[in-house]
Image (spheres, rainbow, N blue to C red):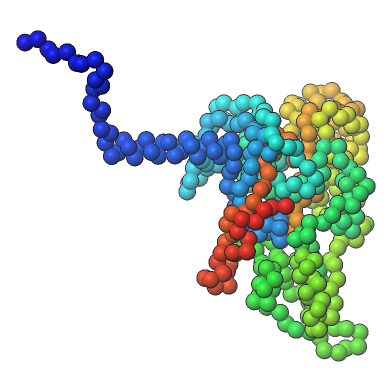
Amino acid sequence: MQQAKRKWGNKPPRVKKSPVREWFDSVLFAVVAATLIRFLTFEAYAIPTPSMENSLMVGDYLFVSKLHYGIRTPKTPLQVPLTHQKIWGTELPSYSTAIQLPIYRLPGFTHIKNGDVVVFNYPPPKAGEPAYPTDLKTNFIKRCIGIPGDVIEIRQEQVFINGKLFLTPPRSETTYFVKTNEVLDERFFRKYDIVNDFKSPEGPFINWQPLESVNDATKTPMLVGYRVNMTQAVREKFADFDWVKGIEPMREPVDQVTPGIYGGSAHAWNQDNYGPLTVPKKGVTVPINKHTISVYGPVIQRYEENSGVLITPTGIRINGQPITTYTFKQDYYFMMGDNRHNSEDSRYWGFVPEDHIVGKAVFVWMSIDPVPADIWHKIRWNRLFRVIG
């Protein structure tokens, strides 16, 4: 029997996908789409520490734009999609270093400016962490204080850039010693968003704590002293209370050296009195001597892809050859947290290389109080969709 011929233009019947196949295709499409969006446009982040308070608070969820400064090509292409460092819920690495590519940055809308809030990969080796590739290092968020070529100086906590005063962000915090004749508790401080940190990857942070009780010169009733991190606006509110007997800024004296300060081995610097220090700029040559080695030596060794770097207090050798000058291969930035006395930033670990920049923080889309006073205050409604500035 002769087989009937299919009419011209007729299509074979479409094979219906099984529910499992449809589910798999949907998940695959969602993962690919989310990965592309995360890589090409915006990525969501959460604030885990109070180092940017009160501009950004613990529990803020924000979007970071990759488009503003330009998309950074991946150094480590072999990664499990939508992961960072480890596979969800495990200690297993989510990547392979079998392939490592050079990092490039596509053109962006703008360049990093003084005052921008920037997400970046924490540059130096972090204690207790593996030696992650550049694009998989821990993400940090700080305010950019200095751009390439800027001269940074901090005098009595005031920041100067190229000799000009850099305006303190209006919601930034600093530390005051508050004298009162009232005993204050956590409920009081919570009214002003002053809450002690519950956990912090950067270390212990204390936004308020009672200090030793103090007596005035006349031996009248005892005054209670509190160390409080607060904004200027909250300080002004405190000053209006008749039971507040004094509010004094807690700053380190000029001649005191802060342990662990970046560059402090050759300079008498501390967190409130720092610099002057020039931020490295691509193509700029600096002399190598005992004064510059402490601030530029780690840069030359860690981020410039030089091999065989040997640093001593008096000199630097690259592949056995002593150098008297050095020309930087990329741009660098100086970052600081808005919570000036509760921030691990460039004052402690140095400059951020350009290839460590992730993107610009643009706005907070959700804010959840990690230690709410009650269930009704779990969400900070006044912070939703707040533009970051």
Q: Is residue 334 visible?
A: no
Left or right, 5 with respect to 197, comes to left
Front-lying residue, 303 or 57: 57
**Looking at the image, which residue is at 88% across and 88% down?**
219
Residue 388 in picture, x, y percent from top left: 69, 52
Left or right, 209 with reference to 5: right
In the rendered image, the quadrant that contains the N terminus is top left
Q: Is residue 203 above or below residue 263?
A: below
| Corner quadrant of residue 198 | bottom right
Q: Is 121 above or below relative to 106?
A: below
Residue 100, given in percent of the width and then of the height, sits at 60, 27
Determine the image quadrant of residue 321.
Answer: top right
Please tell me whether residue 74 is drawn above or below residue 119 in the rendered image.
above
Q: Position of residue 337 (x, y in %)?
A: 75, 53
Q: Position of residue 206 (x, y in %)?
A: 70, 65
At 76% from the left and 70% from the top, the residue drawn is 234
Task: Looking at this view, name the residue that lies furthest to the left.
Answer: 1
